[in-house]
Amino acid sequence: MSLSLSPSRPSLRRARVQALDALRGLALGGILVVNITQLAQMYRYDATVSGLIVDVGFHQRFFPIFSFLFGIGFALFLESARGRARRPRLVLLRRLVILAGFGIPHHLAQPGEALLPYALFGILFLLPASYLPRTAVLVLGAVGSAAALVVAGGGVLLVPGLFLLGMAAARSGLVRDVERRPGMLTGLLVAGLAIAVPLTIWYLTMPLRERFAGYGGPVAAVAGLSAAMAYTGGFLLWLRTRAGAVACRALAPLGRMALTNYVVATALVLLLIGPLGLVGSESYGVVFALAASVIAAQAGFSVWWLGRFRYGPLEWLWRCGTWWQAVPLRVPGPGEPPEPVG
């Protein structure tokens, strides 16, 4: 069964959901904190309070959010491509191959980066799953995620299941009005905290050797995934407030340019960790300052750039390669069509 929707169901194609772009921007910032410690080979999380915060507040907490959103984006793009191409899955395959092309050189600079595995997992799991009904995708995503948690202790093998869960969520219509579902968001927050808090305490009682061997295995992985649920629910609820609306306007452009910002952040960190004396250190407070500075600069640049152009620089190249033609880059003027999804 393909992703085509019955006439009674509203299409997935719509204007961008600002809240999800902001959530992607938040996840980008959390991932950056972890990436800095990895690039600087900082592994003594037990040495300082700030190191402990990195360990239990950031590790395995933000990449699940990013992976889930990737699955949503895949489903949205496929639905958009169905209305624009005779062979939409071929367009998706080309898109994933190009993402792998970005990922290969990025992997050389940062082993363990996300672009290359995302592209490979997308080809291996998301494309085949696009032929399945939504319920089957949901079940496979749940089973795959559970298996990755129990057998492999989370990590990169958790990504395929999260991709599928994101795809199922998009196809169920949840992303169309996520901002107007406070009950669901509150449930995510409460359930996530109820699981994450006791498991994190259990993790902290483990011997250090066991704790840092794969970040505590399944206990840390389940705690991380549960915390990601809580972060998602709490953040999206906060965006409903006046202060959250202001933050959304700053973070949404950051999330829309996630590919560009992710790659550029790696280059900036590699340039700065040496002069800042972070390599092999225990200066986790400096990690937070560096991550905050990079994210603030990128958020400001993203707002400026997207005020003038439709897509970020790498996003534009990605889109041109995906459609195999040059696409308009400047922001549409009055009377011109708005930015399409994908």
Image: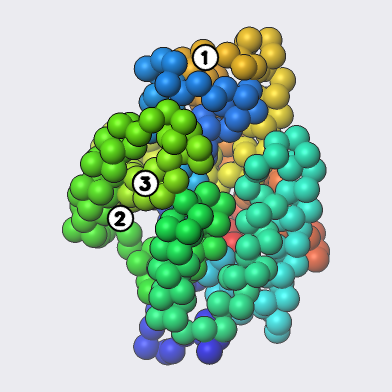
Give the amino acid at mark 2. Answer: Glu
Which mark is first along the chain, 1 or 2? 2
Q: State which mark lies toward you, 2 or 3.
A: 3
Residue in the image at 22% along x and 53% along y: 191
What residue is pinned by disc 1?
Answer: 282
- Name the residue nearer the viewer: 277 or 296: 277
Residue in the image at 35% along x and 34% along y: 206
User: Residue 292 appears at what percent x and percent y?
Assistant: 49, 23
Give the amino acid at mark 1. Answer: Glu
Tell me the SS state at disc 3. helix
Residue in the image at 71% along x and 70% along y: 93
Give the amino acid at mark 3. Answer: Val
> Can you say whether 75 is above or below 276 in the image?
below
Which mark is first along the chain, 3 or 2? 2
> Can you say whether 274 is above or below 112 in the image?
above
What residue is pinned by disc 3?
Answer: 219
